[in-house]
Image (cartoon, rainbow, N blue to C red):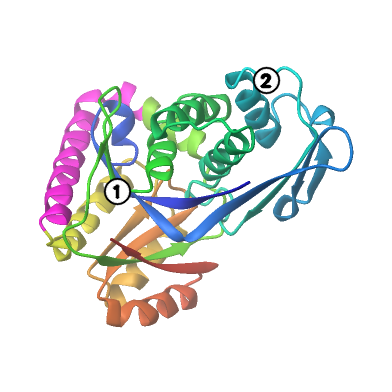
Amino acid sequence: MKATAPGKIILFGEHAVVYNRPALAVPVEQVHVDVDVLDANEPGVWIHAPVINLQAELSTLPSDHPIGSVILKVFQHLGISTFPNISIIINSTIPVAAGLGSGAAVSVALVRALSSFMSLSLTNEQVNQLVFEIEKLHHGTPSGIDNTVITYNMPVYYMKDKPIETFRSGKPFTIVVGDTGIPAPTKESVGDVRRLWLRDSNRFEVIFNEIAQISLIARRSIESGRPEMLGELMDHNHEFLQQMTVSSPELDVLVYAARKAGALGAKLSGGGRGGNMIALVDPALAESVAEGLMSAGAKRTIITEIK
């Protein structure tokens, strides 16, 4: 049984989403995780993940292992106490710790492949809920964005504790992703923003309200087929993220390089202090913006069309 899951990027609203403001995120099909589940020739649950040099039997992994814990959680959820003899092969083109949802994508693909192998079909809602529980194991208090966008494979307007809203783009638009190559310490940056908010909550509430407006206008612009409006909104959102101390010199250099190369707007995406940034571009300029980012120090770029 095979299952695939895409990566994701946050367009707007990162960090503010933790404080009950909306965030917008979209799937990135250009990078993905593929999971194959096959009958094994030997007893046990064998995991092969070449990208992280993992070849092991499930029982030999620590209980909090990122992949092992997903498999155990799925078996538990499906009520399987006697584990089948299977071989699980995981291949991924999503860079790890780059803010592209690598962990959630592995979880979604694993959940789908394992449940299909057991001839048990799960709804999107069930997959999403199960992966959210898994995300909690690894991230403490995740926003729920990664699992939602990746499970539904659609743009998502997300607010904590509110029903998930997926939506469609009125017109395709092109985003260039630039990766700093620096692991993004999401837990750390979220904790630092919390300390700053506790120290000066009035100032930060104003910033979060501004970002909420940006997210709302961005969604309307995307749905009504006016994605060109997003450039200026990205620039504004990036300024607020700088004020929150979650940008970094490397991210700022890439953001400015993208604008200089002709991007309509650019900002960091995700937890910040590493990971990636995104730029809205005219499709004809996508390659030259990507080249500009590489020249400015990006470790890799992805050109993706949001439909």
Q: Which mark is residue 169?
A: none
Check if residue 151 falls in the magenta segment.
no
Task: Kindly state the secondary structure of the residue where label 1 is placed.
Answer: loop
Q: Where is residue 9 shown, x and y percent of the image?
A: 39, 51
The residue under label 2 is which amino acid type?
Ile
* Residue pictured at 18% horizontal, 64% vertical: 171
Q: Residue furthest front?
A: 119
Check if residue 213 falls in the magenta segment.
yes
- Left or right of 133 on screen, residue 243: left
Which residue is label 1 attached to? 155
- Left or right of 188 on screen, residue 239: left
Q: Which residues are magenta?
A: 196-224
Which residue is label 2 attached to? 80
Q: Where is residue 234 shown, x and y percent of the image?
A: 24, 56
* Residue pictured at 83% horizontal, 40% vertical: 56
Q: Residues within 10 Å of mark 2 (few under 14, many from 20)?
A: few
Quarter holding residue 74: top right
Would you say the magenta stretch is mainly helix, strand or loop? Answer: helix
Q: Where is residue 24 shown, x and y percent of the image?
A: 27, 45
- Tell me if residue 206 comes above or below residue 48 in the rendering: above
Cα separation, mark 1 vs mark 2, equals 33 Å
